[in-house]
Structure formats: structure tokens, C-alpha cells
Image (cartoon, helix red, strand yellow):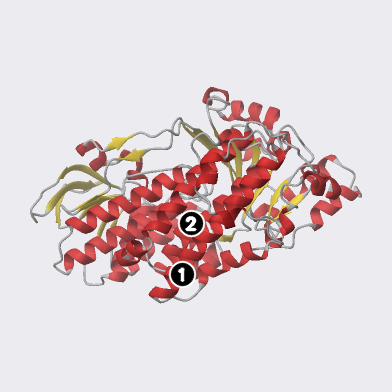
Amino acid sequence: MGGGLAGMTLALQLRRRLPEIDVLVLERRPHPVPLACHKVGESSVEIGAHYFEQTLGLKEHLQGQQLRKFGFRFFFSEGRRDLHRVTELGASRPLPVTSYQLDRGIFENFLGQECQRRGIRFVDNAVIHKLDLHEHGKPHLVHWQQQGAAPQQTAAKWVVDACGRASLIKRQLGLAQGNAHAVHAVWFRISEHIRIDDWPLAVDEADDPAAAAWRQRCETPTRWLSTNHLVGSGYWVWLIPLASGSHSVGIVADPRYHPLERMNSFEKAMDWLQEFQPALFDDLDAKRDKLQDFHFFKRFSHDCKQVFSEHRWALAGDAGRFLDPFYSPGSDFIAIGNTYITELVARDLAGQRLGAHVQVYEQVFRSFYDSTLALYVDQYGLFGDPEVLPCKVIWDYTYYWSVLAQMFCQQRLADLASMGHLRGELALCQQLNIEVQRFLRNWGAVSQRRNLPVMLDQASVPWFVELNRSLHDPSLDDAAYRERIRAASRRLQRLAGELLQRGLQQHPGLDGSALRALLPATALQPTAEGLLFPAADALMAPEALRAEG
């Protein structure tokens, strides 16, 4: 039920894994859907990209019809027009693992066609009137109707709700659940690409040495192909280019800093940008006639009491849980949830019991959600901090690539034996993340927020680049995989130790006792080469930043 990104990718995954089964996809919207202005969720990261490329076999479409992303990029540009004179965090060249900027209209039209090519019955313009859920192996009944046709009733052994926030099963069974993350978002599309690389020259002489140096810091492809973040206290603004020629613009904010009422129309959003991100305002002001759409959500992050059931139903994508668009985890969690659903269907078809595996998958999926949610809750106040946010970004990437992305890319999500062997390491990593986020939040409350004209180049950190590259390693055997996760745990401990020491060096009054208690003595010992940026200086040390500035 639901033929958006979650529903169609699940159908393709099921068909690829279990070619003998009959799959029906019922989608409310008529196809083809509009380009550019179809849906948000346009930026993919490593798990989602791996899922689309490898699990579903869609690499040819992604490389030929979508845009390759030039990573994440951050500018501490609040109130500024001179991006070449503020701190920039990003990579000077693409990292080894490719991800994509997805025009959701192009992608979902392709997915609908691909479903039909692979023998999946895809019915668009279909409204679901009623769902009868049954237990004890009796088929579920879906009552639906395609526009202009007679009502139909379909019996199915499994039913998956991929209807997004309108989730029928969630409402029918009372599964909706809130969380502690009360942020909102507004977004719109402009029918022309935003060339962020040209912004400095819009306000400076063409021969300005600082602007020329800024332009030369990145190899091609240029910055505009990144998911660009313009950040400030309590908010971030996204800029995402689309293959159709449009550009997606969004403002995501904590209402404690920036109420929705200040940005819930295009005119209000433009007024807000004029105050907080004037360089973007200047670019958009000349493109007002190219506005394609405008939308907003008041409180977009949500939870769900249960997403998998031994009674052969499940919730996929936004129908179940949604976190936050920062770091673009939406397609990642679609990939993870769909993989667990596919495993359960495969077990069922093999005549195996579901109860124990449903319980474990639910628990593991919940732990992934909770761990990732910790990256966001009460952290928006850090987003305008050039001292602390780069530390957070390095930690968050490392945590993601070291644990969750390794599990997915090594096809270990359902490897319960390895999870049992690694229970202690995984629990420690999760607890470390919670305490690091708390320490960063406390650090942000006292930092001096130096905003210096320097690029913090992620591509200059060899271990960081190698960690990214390792996501494409061939499948490891059990022993090698478990050692990789153990090594990741040790790296995270060391990185947490460096963050703790650096924060306390700059602000001796910070309370790092809870984080320190999780770390072995070896993680707190100084080393010749730090894990942060080269010599642990280029990222945070004021003297190094002043020298380069």
C-alpha cells in the first residue's frame, strides 16, 4: 500500500530476492509524476546509495539520469554575503564512495516503470478504502479502487503500509508515537540551478585574491553539486541540485530559535533569508518568477510503536518512523527497514517461525533509530558554531561509517550471530555517541564561535577517506567483519578522547566526567598524529586557524 520510494523499492527488493512471489503495488498518485516538485528527500548518502545501486541493481539509472553528489558542505554564513571569508567544512575532492542527488520525480517515474519491467503489478491512481487485517495465517484483505474502475478486493498473505504519514495501519492500530524532536521545515524548488561557486564574485571585484583562492580550494566537480548547508544557531538551510535543472531549497529550524510562523510562506521565507542568509536571498531574489512550489511541515519527526509484526504486516519508510533531513538519513532507513521486511517474508515463505525474529529486528531497528535521533535532539543550537559543529560532523560521520554503514554494506543487518558476538562493542558505541552528543552540546554553550576564512578539508584526513572507501570492500568473512567492528569501537573511543581533550583545553570548566568514564586510559593518551584533522590542529586549534586565515 503506497508506491512511493519506500513501496516501490521494497517491491523491487522482494522481487529480486524472491522471484516466485506475486507483488502488487497500489499508488494513490497518477503516474507519471511531475519532475522536480514531486517530493523532498532528494539527497542520498552511503547506505541509501548502496541500496539503490547494489541491492536493487539501479546503478545505470543513477549514473545516467541523476546527479552525482559532491558530498556534504557547510558554510557558517549567517548574516554574511562573503562565503569566501567564513569557515567552510567539506571536501576539496569527491570521497571514494559515490552518492547521488535524486530528482524524486525522475526517480519515482523510473521505479514505477522498473517495477512493471520486473513483473510487479504496479497500479497508480488507486485509492485504498479499507484494510482488513487477520491473524493465524488468514490472508489480509485490501479494498481498493482505481479511478474510473470498479472497486476491487485483494487477498494477500503479507501487507506492507508504505503510505507515508497517512499510514493506514498506524492509524488503524493506534501505533503513532511522538518523540523529543520538535523541529519544522519549509521547502521549495526553483527552476534553475543555484551556482553557489559564483556567489563571492557577485559582491567582490573579479580579481579579489580571497575570492580566487576560495574558488581554487575545490577540484571539479564544483561546490554547487554538494548538498550545501548554510548554517546558523537553531537552523540550517539546504541547497540540493536536481537533474531536471531545478534546485531544491529548504529551511529546517528549531522553533525555540526560529518559529515556523516566520517562514511558512514563500514571501516570509524570503524575508527570513534576507536577514539570516542574505547571499542566498540575493540569488533567489532575481529568480522569484522561477518558483515552482512551496511546502512546510510543522513537526516532521515522528516515531512508531511497532513496524514489524509476526502477523505478516509491516510499515515501511515514513509510514513508520522519520528522523530529520540533516545528514539525509531518509533513504538509509528505507533501505534498512525494507531489508528487514524482505528477510521476514523470506523466512515466512521458507516455513520458518517469525515471532523471535520479528522481536529482534524490531529491537535492532529501534536502536538504530534512537542512536541516530541522538544526533539531532537539542543539537540545533550548535549549528552556527564554527568551533563545535565541525567536531560534531566528524564524529557523526565516523559513527555512521564505522557501525551502521558497515553493517549494511557488509550485508550483516540480519546476522544475529555477529550481533551477539559484538553486543558489548555495539552497546559501547551507542553509549559513547550519547555522551559525545551531550559533551558537544555543553561545549557549544561556552564556545567562542571563531568564524575564520578557512576550509576544513575532509579529503585531507587519510583515515577518514579510507573509512569511507572501506564501505565498498568485498564481503568479509565472520572473523574479519567482527574485527572490523571491534577496530571501529577502538577508533571511536580514541576520537571521543581527542574531542574531550580538545574541548577541555579550550574550556577547562567543561564537565566531561560522564564521557571520560566510558574511555580507557589509552584513549586519553596523546599521540603523535591525531584522528581529527592533520595533527589535530586544522580543525579546531585557534592558532592554526588564525595562521591560515
Residue drawn 69% across the image and 49% down it: 89
Residue type at the position of mark 2: Ile
Mark 1: secondary structure? helix
Residue type at the position of mark 1: Glu
Q: Residue 483 carries which label?
A: 1
Name of the residue lying farthest toward the front: 521
Front disc: 2 or 1: 1
Q: Is residue 64 above or below residue 29?
A: below
Q: Residue 307, how many percent across, how many down? A: 28, 48
Q: Is residue 89 above or below residue 47?
A: above
Q: Residue 130, how many percent across, how many down? A: 17, 42
**Mark 2 Cα shell of 10 Å, populated few (<14), some (14-19), many (≥20):** many
Q: Which mark is residue 455?
A: none
Q: Could one spot residue 131 in this view of the protein? A: yes
Which residue bears the numbered disc 2?
Answer: 106
Q: Is residue 516 above or below residue 448?
A: below
